[in-house]
Amino acid sequence: MTDAPAPGRRLGPWQTATVVEVRPETASAKTFRLRLPGPSGHQAGQHYVVRLTAPDGYVASRSYSVASAPDAGPEIELTVERLEEGEVSSFLHDVVVPGDVLEVRGPIGGWFVWRGETPAVLVGGGSGIVPLMSMLRLARRTQRSELVRLLVSVRAPTDLYYADELPGPETTVIYTRVASPGSPRPPGRLDLDDVARALVAGSIVYVCGSAGFADSATELLTAAGAAPGDIRVERFGPTG
């Protein structure tokens, strides 16, 4: 994920984070739980940069959204999709195990954040659910679930991140190619009716996904009545 830091805001130093757990989310995505030297201080929607340095000095770094809810502890979770040509994501998936140490920097981002105090509509495509999951987890942890509505679009049930945790009255899953058994909605792309049902007047809308998904979702949200100034968008690309 990418997001520019707030103007005039200095980034913190690089830190060493210990990998304490690695667990699969889908066939191509894993969640890495990292323990930082001190409290992360992150807000829902922010991200961290992970930096890898090879023995010959070559450096590669990528930004990954935090999936865990903000708390006072030193641990964060990053969910990473493995990309075939991705230097960092391939290393994380194929090499990293609990006990390893990674260099990280963050939290980063001051605009695409939700502090858990006002109504929010969350619209994610595929792996774009990651920062939105941090927001949903925050709402559930603080018992403010009534403030959020999450709409996530994925190709099939096997592509759904956090499948065991996600279901609830605040969430709706749209399957675009293969629907889950018993799903009341046939497979198909996100449409105006889907968005209109999720939209709540007075909410800030957070959209995260590929550029194509973000643009399409924004058009649908605007058509459904969302004010352009109330829509916050984070786009990502396959930079891995």
Image (cartoon, grey):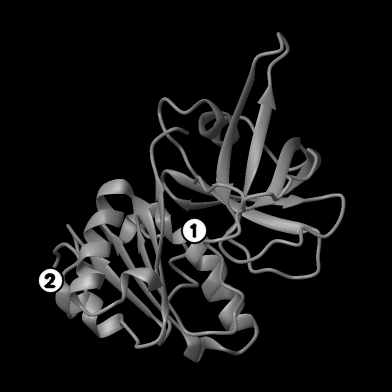
Figure check: 14 above or below 167: above
Q: Residue 4 carries which label?
A: none
- Name which quarter of the figure residue 169 lies in: bottom left
The 10 Å Cα crowd at callout 1, few under 14, some 14 to 19, many 20 or more, is many
| Residue matched to label 2 | 186
2 or 1: tag closer to the N-terminus: 1
Across and down, in percent, residue 61 comes to 60, 30
Q: Residue 130 carries which label?
A: 1
Q: Which residue lies furthest to the front in this view?
A: 8
Q: What residue type is labelled 2?
A: Pro
Q: Nearer the viewer, residue 143 or 109?
A: 109
| Left or right of residue 124: residue 30 | right
Q: Which of 31 and 76 is in front in this view?
A: 76
| Left or right of residue 85: residue 62 | right
Across and down, in percent, residue 97 comes to 68, 38
Q: Residue at the spot x=67%, y=31% of the render?
A: 51
Q: Residue at the spot x=72%, y=42% of the render?
A: 105
- The secondary element bearing badge 2 is classed as loop
Q: Residue at the spot x=69%, y=57% of the render?
A: 76
